[in-house]
Image: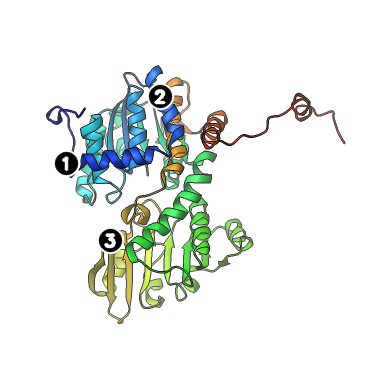
Amino acid sequence: MTVALDKLKYEIKDPALATLGKQRIEWAGREMPVLRQIRDRFAQEKPFAGIRLVACCHVTTETAHLAIALKAGGADAVLIASNPLSTQDDVAASLVVDHGIPVFAIKGEDNATYNKHVQIALDHRPNIIIDDGSDVVATLIQERQNQIADLIGTTEETTTGIVRLQAMLKDGVLTFPAVNVNDADTKHFFDNRYGTGQSTLDGIVRATNILLAGKTVIVAGYGWCGKGTALRARGMGANVIVTEIDPIKAIEAVMDGFRVLPMAEAAPQGDIFITVTGNKHVIRSEHFDVMKDGAIVCNSGHFDIEIDLKSLKSKAAEVKNVRPFTEQYKLNSGKSVVVIGEGRLVNLAAAEGHPSAVMDMSFANQAMACEYLVKNKGKLAPGLHSIPVEVDQEIARLKLQAMGISVDTLTAEQVEYINSWTSGT
């Protein structure tokens, strides 16, 4: 049964897209058994009854299942987009029409609309904020100090957002609990590595139809997202070069079989450039100057700051769309540089984001983190908190169970041995 739209506040592209969105949400749910089990439990226990919740996430089929689970748990939830190009408009429509969840998200929305939606979310006076990139939290701290008293806490599942929260903590402005979902083992080991690795290349191939085999791919950053991207690119036959600032990660990349170079040396060699660092201007003016004619540049970090597009535009005699989500910058030098997805998340701008099987665990973490905040209201100190190990392990157990995989358990003798210091060789 659909919801009476005249009674529901929302801002989406077109409610008529709901039928397609519903089909795609149901398809994604086939590979999200962990979140489904959590949703069923939430529906019985109602852990979020009376809780106002704001989620600033990529509005995808997988996120839809998180929003539905939170509502089943009694949350008064509002959903906004965490990135102007990541919204799937049919999904947003279905959440509004079929589930009665207020959504404020339109694919391609400009910065003014994006910022307006952040303000609308804060008008909801949230008790819990689920943030991707910490824009809502940062705006709350900077502009809505009077609402901090309403807040039980926040959750964050992006590396970029965690870096921002750490900066807030250092500056003494993080005066409430924040759960670091990003560092849960069942999140970054799988979402960042396998999800980002596959979906990044999916976005590149959909946008360009380029053959990866034989190409030289430059991966900027060798965190979990960079590892996954480099691994999948090599699996498709590409020659991969990694750039890094961390000597430990650089050694790891070398021992994983990749070449490691500074960006200045890698730039003339690359056919495809992928940034996954979370930092600003990783690819800059001097790098564009030495790139090959036709080099393809994209980003799989959270914000669109990793590629210095302002300097690229200043060098361009012409900018034109050559394919959907693909722009060619014809430089004054005569060469061209191709940018995918306006430098935003390529896997969401030009494709569909991570596979649902991976997001099943990530969003299970988000759901459980919200429940953890509610259960521990008033008990957690301000600052960053990790997902409890037992929650992480329970999510992994549920995933294995759904996959039909069993693992060993310790015998009584083994338990006694590992808990004793007197037993030696």
Residue 89: x and y in percent read 24, 45
Q: Which mark is residue 325?
A: 3
User: In the structure shown, which secondary structural element does the residue marked by tag 3 occupy?
Assistant: loop
Q: Earlier in the sequence, mark 2 or mark 3?
A: 2
In this view, the residue in front, 335 or 59, is 59
| Disc sitting over residue 16 in the figure | 1
Residue 347, located in which quarter of the rendered image?
A: bottom left
Q: Is residue 19 above or below residue 215?
A: above
- For the residue pair 419 and 326, the one nearer the viewer reads as 326
Q: Earlier in the sequence, mark 1 or mark 3?
A: 1
Q: Which circle, 2 or 3, is nearer the viewer?
A: 2
CA–CA distance in space, label 1 to label 2: 29 Å
Residue located 41% across and 48% down the image: 354
Q: Secondary structure at mark 2?
A: helix
The image shows residue 207 at horizontal and vertical percentages of: 32, 62
Name the amino acid, label 3: Phe
Label total for image: 3
Q: Quadrant of the N terminus?
A: top left
Q: Which mark is residue 40?
A: 2
Could you tell me the amino acid type at mark 1?
Answer: Ala
